[in-house]
Image: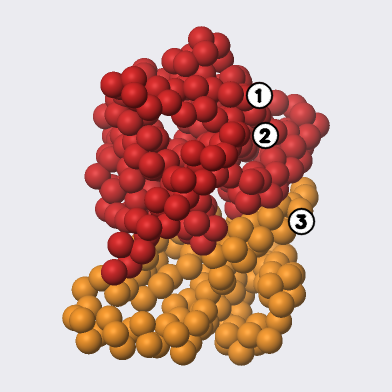
Amino acid sequence: MIKAFKKFINKLMGNVFKKKKNIKLGLYGPPNGGKTTLANRICKDWIGEDMGSVSEMAHETREIKIKEEIKIKSEDGKKEISFNLVDTPGIATKIDYEDFLKYGLKEKEAKERAKEATKGIIESIKWLDEMDCVIVVLDATKDPYSQVNVTIIGNLAARNIPVLIAANKIDLKKSSVKKIEAAFPQYQIVGISAKKGKNMDDFYSKIFEVLD
Amino acid sequence: MAKPKKALVFEFMQFSEINSLSSKERISKIISIVKENKIILLEGRFKKQEEAQLIQKTMEEIDNQFKGIEIAIINPSKDNLSLFGKFKSSLASLLLGEREGFTLIGPASIIKEIKQNPQKINQLAIELS
């Protein structure tokens, strides 16, 4: 009964998308999950250019970035969707400027970066209401059951925003898509490596499924 | 003279203490206690959107002293219940609302890591400097 209702809502949402011109597709997740790497991969695959800079240091993305009118096609070429891709700063519950010192930043720079990171997280949360669909990018080498992940996914569900979970970094030995599937069994999940471009066809198919 | 040892302070909070407060007031109350370097064990949990507001408010408060929070929200499991058990549990949820489960929340400078799953806290790493 609940499933049928969910399907009905999804269908309804799908119809809304068909009518809506500028779908906002957001990339959300904790810091260093690979949101910008995925954004770059999507942009490279469909428009042939990068979207933002990537770093091993957490909170590299500290401002919302938008790439407008990306068009993707289904494998059989019959379906096409156009969306504005929104790359968001990683959401965390704590920021310590001293963590940035480990990457060689001077104290003043580290404090400035920490301040920008806190502002970025506030922006990310404010933008939740603007999204039509969200891809939650999780690092598949890490424990998926963190409160931040649960909060992000729970908030999207509470707002009835369609969600696809991208279990990223499957090129790494430690990765486990199964752990993410076990933690979030009620969601569509796809294992990818945004860096290596692994399983991206499956990823794009899932986007069509989530938006259908 | 030996340096005095820092004590770990837990504050147990009943849901009734925050029940009548607005979301904004609840969050402000929780953060002000956490900023006193106390760990709160709260009966019940926040609403989903309050969790996001809590993170937002935490970010607004971060400075050189306050580094943020660690939080774990534990919900009772409904997975392995019988049909009647699920009915009872749904009824309890309806009556209790956010009073079900519990929330552990404390300053990130003290709580280093919480490993959790939906039903329990597996590991709580605390550091007193």
Kindly check if marks 2 and 1 are in contact, taking CB atoms under 8 A apart as contact.
no
Residue in the image at 69% along x and 72% along y:
B23
The answer to which of marks 2 and 1 sits earlier in the sequence is 2
Residue in the image at 32% along x and 73% along y:
B77
Q: Which chain is orange?
A: B
What amino acid type should be assigned to the residue bearing mark 3? Glu
Q: Nearer the viewer, mark 2 or mark 1?
A: 2
From mark 2 to mark 3, how far is it between C-alphas? 21 Å
Kindly check if marks 1 and 3 are in contact, taking CB atoms under 8 A apart as contact.
no
In this figure, which residue is indicated by the disc labeled 2? A64
| Location of residue A41 in the rendering, given as x and y in whole percent from the top left corner | 46, 20
Q: Which chain is red?
A: A
What amino acid type should be assigned to the residue bearing mark 2? Ile
| Location of residue A66 in the rendering, given as x and y in whole percent from the top left corner | 64, 28
In this figure, which residue is indicated by the disc labeled 1? A104
Q: Are marks 2 and 3 on the same chain?
A: no
Asked if one can make out residue A150 in the rendered structure from this viewpoint, the answer is no
| Location of residue A10 in the rendering, given as x and y in whole percent from the top left corner | 41, 52
In this figure, which residue is indicated by the disc labeled 3? B61
What chain is tagged by disc 3?
A: B
Instruction: Pick the quarter of the image with the N terminus of chain A.
Output: bottom left
Q: Are marks 1 and 3 on the same chain?
A: no
- In the displayed structure, would residue A184 be above or below residue A105? below
Instruction: Pick out the residue farthest to the top.
Output: A48
Q: Nearer the viewer, mark 2 or mark 3?
A: 2
Residue A164 location, quadrant = top left
Instruction: Pick the quarter of the image with the C terminus of chain A.
Output: top left
What amino acid type should be assigned to the residue bearing mark 1? Gly
What chain is tagged by disc 2?
A: A
